[in-house]
Amino acid sequence: MIQSMTGYGKTVLQLPTKKISIELKSLNSKNLDINARMPSMYRSKELDIRKGIAKHLVRGKVDFSLFVEITGEDTSSKINKTVVQEYIKQLREVVDGDTTELLKMAIRLPDAVATDRDEIDEEEWTIINNGINEALSKIVAYRKDEGAILKQDFLNRIKTLKNLLEDVITMDPERIEGVRERLNKGIADIKEKVDENRFEQELVYYIEKFDITEEKVRLDNHLDYFIKALNSDDSNGKKLGFISQEIGREINTIGSKSNYAPMQKLVVQMKDELEKIKEQLLNAL
């Protein structure tokens, strides 16, 4: 079924000494664009994370975040006492101030805080990876729910286009008769005797130029094909986009050939509905 590219998924894991928050947010995009944020110690796993995201989400602008909050006594950051004391000593030579103020300045300087790069515990990573998969399942479910709303909107608008096409088909004989009457009136106004056979030939030629039979058939087929693609098992917004382009071509041709104000009003309504479909397709996976 069709999916939206808009989605959100979050998982929170409580480990013995840390809390892990995993978030995934996605918006529409022509291609897959992943922005990943995580602590440096997990960077070695970034390629695997990206592959998992690409497998599940396929397309869209995706923000992946992995936050770590230390909740136990274990921490990888330690104050480098020797460096801090040396900074305070040097600062006293430059400015006057109490120890607390000098400490605030010193702690911001390079190497004041040393961070030990921990190796990833594989058992811990298995738990985190399961959490990532859970967040991916949530965002996919979100996308499917949004896709169901999109699908219903598409079906409603295609139904409207079908109804407008029926109005065009019903109106077409009246339009052709109008063309015939205008030509007859034009001949009568110039008060010229014409060869009836020749006039009929020219009339047939002229009416054929304004014939929209093929366009009506093709437009109806394209609308049916759009519904078929919409109901398929896969979600393919790009394919639906190509079909909507073909629908637009037939509508434009009917508009340019109609030469009949009531029919052109219907064409304007059809273009409006199609434009709304195209706008929504930008968010379809």
Image (cartoon, helix red, strand yellow):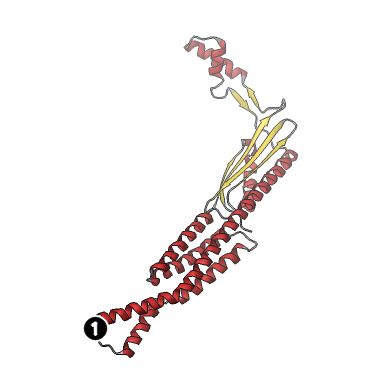
Placement of 251 over or under 197, stated as above or below:
above
Q: How many labels does the image show?
A: 1
Residue ID for mark 1: 191
The quarter of the rendered structure image containing the C terminus is bottom right
Placement of 182 over or under 238, stated as above or below:
below
- Please give left or right for residue 196 compared with residue 61 in the image: left
Residue found at x 64% / y 53%: 144
- Please give left or right for residue 149 compared with residue 178 in the image: right
Q: Nearer the viewer, residue 97 or 58?
A: 58
Residue neighbourhood size for the residue with mark 1, other residues' Cα within 10 Å, grouped as few (<14), some (14–19), many (≥20): few
Give x and y (percent) for residue 184. 32, 81
Q: Which of 89 and 170 is in front in this view?
A: 170
Give x and y (percent) for residue 240. 55, 62
Among the 4 quarters of the image, the one containing residue 130: top right
Q: Which of 184 and 42 is in front in this view?
A: 184
Placement of 77 over or under 276, stated as above or below:
above
Give x and y (percent) for residue 34. 57, 46
Q: What amino acid type is highlighted by mark number 1?
A: Lys
Residue found at x 69% / y 33%: 19
Give x and y (percent) for residue 159. 55, 64
- Please give left or right for residue 71 compared with residue 202 in the image: right
The quarter of the rendered structure image containing the N terminus is bottom right
Element at badge 1?
Answer: loop
